[in-house]
Image (tube, rainbow, N blue to C red):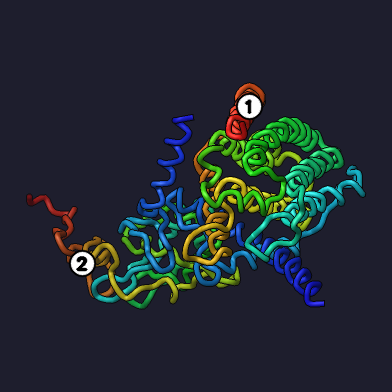
């Protein structure tokens, strides 16, 4: 009974916190972008403009929920739900602190990779079901980008798995007690960060929704809360990738003095800010540049990292 | 790659730059004195209305937002019976001020004229008239004009010579 209650609390707690964080990121992103552009950002509603989140939510919930008559209705409705569902599923395996975290899956890392692959469907189906050429172009770009970045996203993590000797995210964190993996796996970190940005299709890799070229890309035809779901999914994705970078490369909850949850939160927050800084600073590359960058630079780097790590692990074992 | 990192660092440093945003209602932006804002009707130094109801402002107005009716008092001084500016039409071009021969109509640096109802933007003469001479202190049209009105005949205005007697041959 106690055990069930504990599990239930964990599930509800993680769900509530991740959704709250995703909503709060709307405000955080606008404030930080403003900070780096010499502006103030939303600072009127409530203290520091924090209630802007509430105002935005009231607005988006009361917007007209329009499904275009030419759209493929069931798929159109399903697509935004997929992105949120898959990202929330991935949060199940993220170890937040000892005793906090939904599931202690022994193939946690593989589960995350599987879920992020499923997330591609959301974008592709949204682009397809909208029956609009810009949305379709966005969906095509998204599928090409996410499928190709998926490849070395997985490969870049294999170095971590080799060093930790486990797919379990808790054991990976525990393996970093002596040295965070960001030092021996610095190549893996760079590759995973790029792949993570591409997976969440954030700037500078936001080609699927490149608003200067494709109206709004795959979600051109979406409005109201369905549009909101894509954004919740995007912000959840940022949080997830940040949390995973922290877990895999920066020692998760490990850290002196402060309690583990605080360490995890602080580290994740820093990476969320890095994501927003990337958006504030970098321009969007051309599509062929994106692909060339992925296949000609990132994939060889990931393979090199894997071979080198494997060699080191073998040499050490011998 | 290096240039990307440099860019990110540069952008990050902008966090410590002064903000360019002016927090408007709390922090008022500096407005030049010749700003073309809310229109007023000024009075001459004696406290009389400067407007002589010549209709030049109404004619000059490109959006026809000025309406007035001329009348005269017992001394022959012209003044507007009513003077109405519809600020929901006014484009603040300042042509009325340029057209005015008596410096009566003037534009001021006030622009905070928001109203919840459109008809509240129609200003009547009592809304437009101010108690002072506005931008031109000391100017009094009837004192310098060679026009005969009650209490002042031709040739009695300031800087004015008496009218020439056309019937005499003496220099």
The residue depicted at 32 percent of the width and 76 percent of the height is B131
Quarter of the image holding residue B163?
A: bottom left
Q: Nearer the viewer, residue B78 or A121?
A: A121
Residue B160, position as x, y percentages in the image = 16, 59
Query: What residue would you read off at disc 1?
Result: A307
Q: Residues within 10 Å of mark 2 (few under 14, many from 20)?
A: few
Query: What residue would you read off at disc 2?
Result: B138
The secondary element bearing badge 1 is classed as helix
Residue B145, position as x, y percentages in the image = 25, 61
The residue depicted at 56 percent of the width and 37 percent of the height is A185
Residue A168, position as x, y percentages in the image = 71, 50
User: Label 1 vs label 2: CA separation?
Assistant: 92 Å
Q: Chain of mark 2?
A: B
Q: Is A238 located above or below residue A303 in the figure?
A: below
Q: Is B135 located above or below residue A208 in the figure?
A: below
Residue A7, position as x, y percentages in the image = 77, 69
Q: Nearer the viewer, residue A303 or A271?
A: A303
Q: Is residue A227 visible?
A: no
The secondary element bearing badge 2 is classed as loop
Q: How many discs mark residues in the rendered view?
A: 2
Q: Nearer the viewer, residue A293 or B134?
A: A293
Q: Chain of mark 1?
A: A
Residue at the farthest front position: A318
Please give left or right for residue A142 compared with residue B57 in the image: right
Whether labels 1 and 2 belong to a single chain: the reply is no
Q: Is residue A241 visible?
A: yes
Q: Is B102 located above or below residue A191 in the figure?
A: below
Quarter of the image holding residue A5?
A: bottom right
Q: Residues within 10 Å of mark 1 (few under 14, many from 20)?
A: some
Please give left or right for residue B159 compared with residue A145 in the image: left
């Amino acid at each position: 009974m106690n055990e069930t209650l504990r599990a239930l609390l964990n599930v509800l707690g993680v769900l509530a916190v991740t959704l709250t964080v995703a909503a709060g990121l709307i405000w955080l992103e606008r404030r930080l972008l403003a900070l780096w552009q010499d502006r103030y950002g939303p600072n009127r509603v409530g203290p520091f403009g924090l209630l802007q989140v509430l105002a935005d939510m009231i607005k988006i919930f009361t917007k007209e929920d329009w499904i275009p008559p030419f759209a493929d209705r069931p798929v159109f409705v399903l697509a935004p739900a997929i992105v949120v569902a898959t990202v929330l599923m991935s949060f199940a395996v993220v170890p937040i602190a000892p005793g906090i975290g939904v599931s202690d899956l022994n193939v946690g890392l593989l589960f995350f990779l599987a879920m992020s692959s499923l997330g591609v469907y959301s974008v592709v189906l949204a682009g397809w079901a909208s029956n609009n050429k810009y949305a379709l172009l966005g969906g095509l770009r998204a599928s090409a980008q996410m499928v190709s970045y998926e490849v070395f996203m997985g490969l870049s993590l294999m170095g971590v798995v080799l060093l930790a000797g486990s797919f379990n995210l808790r054991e990976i964190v525990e393996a970093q007690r002596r040295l965070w993996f960001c030092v021996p796996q610095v190549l893996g970190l760079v590759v995973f960060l790029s792949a993570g940005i591409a997976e969440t299709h954030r700037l500078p890799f936001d080609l699927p929704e490149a608003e200067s070229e494709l109206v709004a890309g795959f979600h051109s035809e979406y409005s109201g809360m369905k549009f909101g779901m894509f954004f919740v999914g995007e912000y959840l994705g940022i949080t997830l990738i940040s949390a995973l970078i922290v877990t895999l490369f920066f020692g998760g909850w490990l850290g002196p003095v402060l309690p583990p949850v605080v360490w995890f939160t602080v580290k994740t927050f820093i990476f969320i800010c890095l994501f927003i800084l990337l958006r504030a600073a970098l321009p969007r590359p051309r599509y062929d540049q994106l692909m060339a960058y992925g296949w000609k630079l990132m994939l060889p780097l990931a393979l090199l990292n894997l071979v080198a790590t494997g060699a080191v692990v073998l040499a050490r074992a011998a | 790659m290096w240039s990307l990192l440099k860019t990110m660092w540069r952008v990050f440093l902008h966090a410590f730059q002064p903000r360019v945003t002016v927090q408007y209602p709390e922090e008022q932006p500096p407005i030049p004195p010749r700003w073309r804002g809310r229109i007023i009707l000024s009075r001459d130094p004696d406290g009389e209305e400067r407007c002589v109801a010549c209709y030049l402002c109404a004619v000059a107005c490109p959006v026809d937002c000025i309406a007035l009716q001329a009348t005269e008092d017992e001394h022959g001084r012209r003044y507007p019976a009513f003077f109405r500016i519809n600020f929901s039409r006014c484009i603040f071009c300042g042509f009325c001020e340029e057209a005015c021969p008596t410096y009566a109509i003037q534009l001021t640096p006030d622009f905070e004229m928001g109203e919840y109802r459109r008809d509240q933007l129609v200003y009547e003469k009592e809304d437009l008239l101010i108690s002072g001479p506005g931008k031109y202190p000391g100017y009094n049209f009837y004192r310098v004009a060679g026009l005969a009105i009650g209490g002042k005949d031709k040739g009695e205005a300031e800087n004015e010579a008496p009218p020439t007697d056309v019937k005499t041959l003496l220099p």
